[in-house]
Structure formats: C-alpha cells, structure tokens
Image (tube, grey):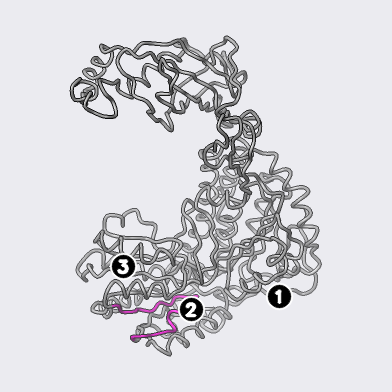
Amino acid sequence: MLESYAAGRWLRGQGEGAPLLDASTGEEIARISSAGVDIAAMTAHARRVGGPALRELTFHERAGLLKSLAKHLSADKDELYALSLRTGATQRDSMIDIDGGFGTVFSYASKGTRELPNDTIVLDGGLERLGKTGVFAGQHIYTSRPGVAVQINAFNFPVWGMLEKLAPAFLAGLPTIVKPASQTAYLTELVVRRIIESGILPEGTLQLLCGSAGGLLDELDEQDAVAFTGSAHTAGVLRTHPNVLHGGVRLGVEADSLNCSILGPDVSSEDPEFELFVKGVVAEMTAKAGQKCTAIRRVIVPTALQDAVIDAVSAKLAKVTVGNPANPEVRMGALASLEQRGEVRKAIESLRASAEVVFGNPDQVDLVDGDPERGAFLSPVLLKAAPGAVEVHDVEPFGPVSTAIGYDDLDEAIALAARGKGSLAGSLVTKDGDIARQVVLGVAPWHGRILVLDSEAAPESTGHGSPMPVLVHGGPGRAGGGEELGGIRGVLHHMQRSAVQASPNMLTAITRRWTAGSTRHEDGIHPFRKSLETLHVGDTISSASRKVTLADIEHFAEFTGDTFYAHTDEEAATANPLFGGIVAHGYLVVSLAAGLFVDPEPGPVLANFGVDNLRFLTPVKAEDEIAVTLTVKQITPRTSADYGEVRWDAVVTNGAGEPVATYDVLTLVAKNWPAA
C-alpha cells in the first residue's frame, strides 16, 4: 500500500485499496487508498508548521534549499528510472519526466538567487509620486500568503508534474500538498520519500496525499491555491466547489488541449524545414506514447502537401518499435493503463466520423516485447481529415494519435488553429518572416506558447512539446486558462500584490530599499570604506563639484572617437534646438561623476559590475559645474560568497542644482573588512 506523508508522518491508507498495475505487464505494483488520512490535519500542519518556517527564510535561502534538493535528487536516479519503466515510459520518456523535473528545480534555484532580492518581499515597478512635494508616494509590493499550495496532478508526468509546481510555490513561501494521479502515484511517492528522508526542506513544506482527494478542497480558504492538471471534466467539478465559487480559493487549470503544428505554405517537400516538420510530428506522437498535454493532435498543412506529409510521417512511424520499455530495442512504450488505452480507442472512433485512418491500427499492434492483452500497448495512429471535419477540433485522443488537416491559405490555417478553442502549445515551421508574423499574431490569442521553427533554430530547438521553466506553461479557453512556470512570473503568481501608500521614509522602512525623498545619512565616513556588515541603506556621500571644461569635452571626443557634432561643432550644436551649443558627452558626465564619488584606496568595495536605468535629463554645457550624490539603495548579501551586492542611487546635478543624470551603480562589497 502506498503511503501518504501527512502532518509529519508516513501513513498507510485503510482498507484494501485500489490496485495499481504495471502498464506493460499488468502486474500489480502497489495499492492505493487515502482512507483514514486526516486531511484537515494536513492543511493545519502546512499553515502552522510549514508556512511559518518557509516564510522566515529569504528568497535566496529558499533558492539555496532548492539547489541542494535538486543536487540530492540528481545524485541517485537509477531507482527512479527503474520504477518509471513500470509507468510504460521508455528511458527517453523517463528522462523528460525525471531529469526534466530536476532541471526545473535547478532553474528556479538559479532564478531565485539571480532575480529575487535576499529578502521576503518583492518590489513591483517603480515608485509612484502621489503628491506635489514628494512626501507621499506609492509602491507595489509582493508578499507571501499564509496559505497552502495544493497540486492535483495528471498521471503522465509523476515527477516533473510535481516538481514544476513545487519549486515556484516554495520560492513564493507557500507549503505544498501534492495529490498525484493514482495510476502512477507510486513514482511520485518514491520521489517525495527521498525528499523527506533528505531533511533538506523544512518540515511541513511538502506533504503527500496518495489516493482520493476526498474533502481536501473543503479545508481550503481565501489564502490557498489549487493547481490542477487533468481533464476538462474534473476541472469543471473543481470550478463548482463552494470554496472556489464563494470562498476565494484560487484555482489554476491545465486541461484538454488540441495542440496544432502548422506547416507554412512557403515550405516545399525538398526544403529542410519539411523534414523538421515531419520529425516534430513523429516525436510528439511517440514521446510518452503521445500522453503529453502539449503533444501535436492536429497537423495543419497546405492541401497540396497533405499526402506528402502523410507519406513522410507514416514512413517514420513504420520504424517506431512498440513494446515493453524495459527492452532497449523499444522506442515507444505502453499507455499508462488499459483504461487509458480504452479511452484513446474511443476517441479515435469519434474522429473517424470525419477522418480516415491512414497509418496504424487502433485495435492491433506489432510488439517487439510484451503482451497486447495485459499491457496497454497501442500502435501510433495517423488520420487524414476530410474537408470540413468537425470532430478533430473537439476530440482529444490522449495517446499516440494525430490528424492531418489541409488548408488552402494562411487565413484558413489560422482559423483552423483557432478552432481548437485554446491550446497549451502550437508550432509553425516556416522559412518566411512575414508568414511567421502573420501566423503568430493570428494564433497567439488561442495559445499559451508558440514555437516558430526554421533550419536556423533547429540545432538548439527544444521541440514543440517541451515546456521550459523560464517560459509560461498554460493556455486559454479549452486548455484551462491557467498559467504556470514562466520564470519568476510563476513565483509571483503565488504571492499577493499590494499597493502601499506612505511617506518615503516609511516606504524605505517597509521595503528595506532606499526610496527617493527619504532620509540620507552622512556620517563623515566615505561609504566605500564600509563593509557590508557596517553599511546601511541610506548611507550617502555628497561630492564636491567639478567644472566641465571645453578642453574636457574636446579631449573626450578625440580620445574615444565620439565626435558627434553636438560635442565638436559649435555652429551645428547651436542650431540644435535641444542643445543650443556645445554639450558634454553623457558618458563623459558619468565618468567624471565616478571620479567625484569614488574612494580610490583598496577597501571593501571589490568591483563595479554594472549600471542600471541610466537617463540623461539635462545637457551639460562647457564650463558647467557638476556634483553627484551617491546613496546606498539596496544591500543584497550573497549566501554563497564572502561579499554581496550593493545598489547605489546616483544623481548628478549641475550648478543650478538640476539633475543632469540619474542611474543605479552596482557594486560588489566584502561582508567584512579587513577580510578575515
């Protein structure tokens, strides 16, 4: 019997449970039941133990734990691969699921460190001035919700499906309860068991419910979220739950998706793009035995090439060996269960109302190794849609099945793609940029992700059906309307965005980032002499002034080669309505400003690694005076180094006190000085 991990304990469900069978042999692997598991205790444990422990950590600390977890899981994958075979997955299928899941955790660990502050809140956008004098302003911030992230997953990706939801929720400060699909829950359970055994994640931040979800949604409230991947029918049931309808529970859905791939009208059968298109279709039909929510179900091609595409796809499908994935000669394994095979056969029968089977036999398959009665094996099946076919745009066969559809012009191709009523992924193979723009703009409102493939992109393309952790995964309409991943977007999706209105000093205190208009601190010690340990937000140096001479401008022009007329030709510069005479180069102004604020002696400031948000506001003319005010804006210690990042607010002013340039200076500063 599979066990649930609930409220800090591994628990075996009561009763006999339902049998879980090997997809290829029909042998019983385990039984599953959630009877007797206290779901209310799970949600309470997440809120009282997991959530507080997680929210005590900064984003960088959470990211560090994710990195450690990904390393730990990646160190010993053999047992996971061995068990994955029993789901019907080949070695390559398992790599997509297992290594793809670990890679997603690695990606979020990296992004959390690089793109989020070493804090527990995120600033969204810039400061909004709300009054005339600057003493009242607004700032949008993201904060962690004191809730629970519940994931209800599909059977096809028992590892990736869990980890791609866990990583962004964990970074956002939300503990997770995982409810895997029963058919392949044994693989999810093993991964969770290894995570819990590692002790890497704080207790209560990850729990597992094997079996029926029972009254799980009954225990959720307005601070909680549910991420569901599965059928549109089940999604509809979840959408009508009272806590979703009236209780404020946020529901994200990834459901049925009739994804399409379009072959551009510019591509001939002799072009390399034609071969790319055919390979893509075959790959999506056979990977995971077509059990991918992003797989190509509709093959939309120019009518004149429909038969050529069918012949080329069929020729490649004929080489696909089907059977027990434990056999190294097998390229496509079994579907997840006999019940799933039955559902796919029903879908094929529905499609045949307006399409003919041109490759494969849904009722018979040649096997390299396996029992066609006990194993859920199915031949790849390619259909050809009749003109005006309807079913192909309404029925999703969740298996190794695609249908070729002809079109006469691009407008028709776009209209056919839209008849899917919303998809997770679409692709276009073309070598024409104008066609690419027309199709992308035409189909984007119905798609969450679009791959445009040509021979240039092919060597590095990840393919039609591969969700990437840095890109959004989800789709409108039929696809559920949800959105996951997308890099930091997936983290912020779990957090609450609020507008905070206050004085600049209060905003600085709240955000721990210096806000324009708040107090600056000048204590007579140059900030460059302070280590990260002694530096504070608001520490400032106000420089002496310096005259920018005509000789400075002429020298800079000659030295750099930037002889733009505004810096070298008095008559032309005077005629320019923006300048009215010779002006200094903007980069000369920034360079001179650096000379005004830098302390040149060796010290805790180790390096300048960039400038952000540089704007030139007022031209500096020859003989103008400039000065600079440099203020510590944000301090971000690096958890993995003896230094951290300091962002400085720089304002360069002229002799009249007008700002001529504003920007952020980025430096690396030692945590202690002298260094130990």
Give the number of the disc on residue 18. 1
Tell me the quadrant of the picture where the C terminus can be found.
Answer: top right
Residue 666 is inside the magenta segment: no
Give the mark nearest the N terminus, 2 or 3. Answer: 3
Under circle 2, the secondary element is loop
State the image quarter where residue 329 is shown.
bottom left
Q: Which residue is mark 2?
A: 397
Seen in the picture, residue 660 relative to 475 is either above or below; the reply is above
Three-letter code for the amino acid on which mark 3 is drawn: Phe
State the residue at coordinates (43%, 90%).
Answer: 353
Q: CA distance from mark 3 to mark 1?
A: 42 Å
Q: Position of residue 198 (x, y in %)?
A: 67, 47
Dot 2: few (<14), some (14–19), or many (≥20) neighbours within 10 Å? many
Q: Position of residue 655 (x, y in %)?
A: 41, 15
- Viewer-nearest of labels 3 and 1? 3
Under circle 1, the secondary element is strand
Give the mark nearest the N terminus, 2 or 1. Answer: 1
Task: State the extent of the magenta-drawn residues as a range.
Answer: 387-407
Q: Which residue is mark 3?
A: 277
Under circle 3, the secondary element is helix
